[in-house]
Amino acid sequence: MAISEGKVAHVAGLAKLAFSEEKLQKFTGQMDEIINMVQQLSDVDTDGVEVTTHVTDSINTMREDNAVKGTARELLMKNVPEHQDGFIKVPAIIDENEEA
């Protein structure tokens, strides 16, 4: 299946991209190679091949999901430059008085 420059230009237009004629030819060739490689994969006989979901034989390697007590808020607040009412104060990044 050969891909045409027209198809590549159409997809580029949908993505709001603009390419020079030279780049369009280059990308068309590259896309054609990619499509040909994908088509080669569909030609591979995979009948009887077991599905691979993991590349290792590890089973149940996840840790137990146990709740643990967190760090005390007072201790955490010792590490912040400024806090108020148990919350960290940060500089405003949106000023409602500024014009857009």
Image (tube, rainbow, N blue to C red):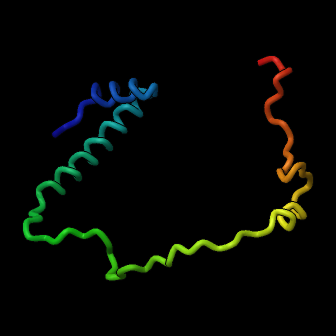
Residue in the image at 25% along x and 70% along y = 52
Of residues 1 and 96, the one nearer the viewer is 96
What is the residue that sits farthest to the top in this orientation?
A: 99
Residue in the image at 82% along x and 23% along y = 96
Residue in the image at 79% along x and 30% along y = 94
Residue 99 figure quarter: top right
Quadrant location of the C terminus in the rendered image: top right
- Residue 10, given in percent of the width and then of the height, sits at 33, 25
- Residue 9, given in percent of the width and then of the height, sits at 34, 26
Answer above or below: position of 28 versus 56. above
Q: Is residue 38 left or right of residue 46?
A: right
Residue 45 figure quarter: bottom left
- Residue 78, given in percent of the width and then of the height, sits at 90, 64
Answer above or below: position of 67 versus 18. below
Residue 46 figure quarter: bottom left
- Residue 36, given in percent of the width and then of the height, sits at 21, 48
